Amino acid sequence: VLMMLSCSMYRPNSPMFSMLTSPAQLLLYGAQEVGVNRVKRWTMSVTSWVDGVLAQVENHEATVDAAIVRVRKSVARARVQVRRVDRDHASLEDALATEIEAESAWRQRARTTEDEQTALECLRRAKAAHRHSTRLRNRITEHERSLKELNDGIGELSGRLRELVERR
């Protein structure tokens, strides 16, 4: 039977095929058809597997590209926030310097005034300026901590961005 399969004269359209008995025709033709079907199934299976792998690679690339875009936006937002915190920090430093000067000026006025009521009022205002400068110092400390955290976050995001770009 194997020899007959390899021979082209036993194909369904050949005159030799018609000379075979019906069971022999079925056996020969069925064997040929089964071989073709197996190859077709195997080819379709391999093609489907390759298509699946390509889809996964394309999906991975799209995911990486989307992650890069998200990280770049996050870095940009963090940098804007750092600039805002820097401006706030500078204005707090200016306000603190003003309050320190005001406290000093009120204490000096209290020492130089001759009226006791005026001197007490100057001391109350100096105390208020001192409390305000203490609150400003606390806020400056908070801003410095926030600024450090933001800068650390930017460094981490920049590292992730470099990793993602290298993966791509």
Image (cartoon, rainbow, N blue to C red):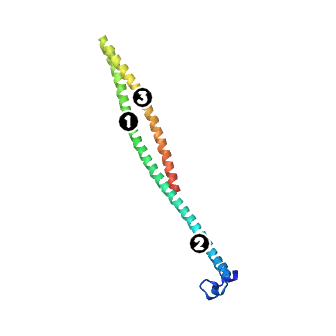
81 above or below 24?
Answer: above
**Percent position (x, y) of residue 161?**
49, 51
**Is residue 155 visible to the viewer in this orientation of the structure?**
yes
Residue at point 69% right, 83% down?
3
Mark 2 Cα shell of 10 Å, populated few (<14), some (14-19), many (≥20) = few
Mark 1 is on which residue type? Asp
Tag 2 or tag 1, which sits nearer the N-term?
2
Position of residue 70 in the picture relative to residue 10 (left or right): left
Q: Which mark is residue 160?
A: none
Residue 132, picture quadrant: top left
Mark in front: 1 vs 2: 2
Task: Work out which quarter of the rendered image holds the N terminus and state it.
Answer: bottom right
Query: Residue 14 versus residue 166: which sits nearer the camera?
Result: 14
* Residue occupied by mark 2: 40
Per the image, the residue denoted by label 1 is 88
Amino acid type at image mark 3: Arg
Q: CA distance from mark 2 to mark 3?
A: 79 Å
- Secondary structure beneath dot 3 equals helix
The nearer-to-camera label among 2 and 3 is 2
Earlier-in-chain disc, 2 versus 3: 2
Residue 63: image x %, image y %?
Answer: 49, 54
Q: Secondary structure at mark 1?
A: helix
Residue position for label 3? 137
